[in-house]
Image (cartoon, grey):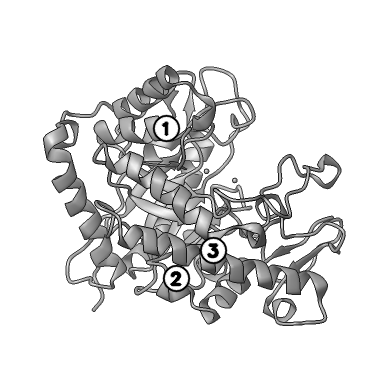
Amino acid sequence: MSGSRRTTAYDRPNAVPKICFLAIAGTLLSLAGSHANAFEVVVGVNVTGTDRLNEQQQDALVEELRQNGVKVVRSGIGPKFAHFTIRAWQNGIRVLAGVPPTAGGSAAHMRAADQSLGLEWVEPGITGADPVKYKVWLEAQLATLESSGVYLAAFELGNEINTAGFNGDFDPTLASGRELGLAELDNPDDPEGRAIAASYRAYLKMLAVLKDVRDRSRLNTRTPIISAGLADSGPPGRRPGQKLDGVSAPATLQFLQRNGLDELVDGYGAHFYPSNQDPSRPVSERIEGLGERALALCTRAKPCWLTEWGFPNSQLSCPIHDEKRERLVRTEREAFQVFVNDGKLVATIYYNWQSLPGFEVPSIFRCGELTVAGKLALQPIVQQSARK
């Protein structure tokens, strides 16, 4: 789907660029596979609905995040996000910028949301993106941020492009309730497989534009580029009762890798919402689930950034009771530690912060304060053993 803090050098504008550059450089060392020294994982939280807030409301949100010690947030890039991103940076909070792959050009293959299919929104098809117009748009957005000295935590191109809601190249008239795999993407006689293969090739062209803009930027030349966080919908196969199609996360990554992905990114985006809500589930089973699904293709050379993860809490009254979710978060973080120790996981971004309409159940800032599960989810994670 997206305690009090001491004043530090992050809060002093003249000191910000150097310190943040060192922080990003440390992350890049881990991305390059250098593990002689332990590294600290990028830990943060998704903020939703930022583009709906006016500047005063965005300022209040930044202050709320700052007071609760948040260091990294996942948000968008573009005119509606610029004020928030700059103000966050000025308050010691870096933004992991979600970059839409279809901005700046015509929205070919755009279709209306169809609630009968369970879709409340539909993003444009990536095959309709215009690389030339996109480059002009992206350069302008980044220039606005860099004029205020902003260093981003990372660029993440696209969101859940392996699903119909976030990629208009999925045609509901072709859907048959499947999770596609590599065999379907490679099959010229499979109409939907052929369409999504073309979509993924178009996505790689937009990644190349992003990398070129990043490489030529004034401040963010070393900011990591992350592939789209992919929805984890399980292995390929039929899904009884499912109206739309998707592509499995491993198959998506494998197809992109075969077509040049690793030359364009520093790491892979991944999303993981554990279906098992039993707090007593052994950590070993949670490790197995991560290794077989969301983090299956992570390596030390191309580690994963878990840009969405979390557990729901449907208890919405105040004061909130969050003890069960705290236990779930604790065991999941213990599972993360195994992949962190192997250098295969370098970021965990919880979903989500605010209790905005429609986002209450996953949120961790409730009743005017950070919940116990939220405090735990945002605790630092440090590599415990460096493997040569």
Q: Amino acid at mark 1?
A: Val
Residue 368 position, x and y percent, is 44, 18
User: How many numbered discs, if any?
Assistant: 3
Identify the element where label 1 is drawn.
Answer: helix
Could you tell me if the residues under marks 3 and 2 are in contact, i.e. CB atoms within 8 Å?
no
Residue 153 shows in this picture: yes
Residue 213 position, x and y percent, is 37, 58
Identify the element where label 2 is drawn.
Answer: loop
Lower sequence index among marks 3 and 1? 3
The numbered mark at residue 71 is none
Lower sequence index among marks 1 and 2? 2
The structure residue drawn at horizontal position 60% and vertical position 24%, both measured from the top left corner, is 316
Q: Amino acid at mark 2?
A: Cys
Residue at which label 3 appears = 294
Residue at which label 2 appears = 298
Could you tell me if the residues under marks 1 and 2 are in contact, i.e. CB atoms within 8 Å?
no
Q: How much space separates mark 3 and mark 2, taking CA atoms? A: 9 Å
Residue at which label 1 appears = 372
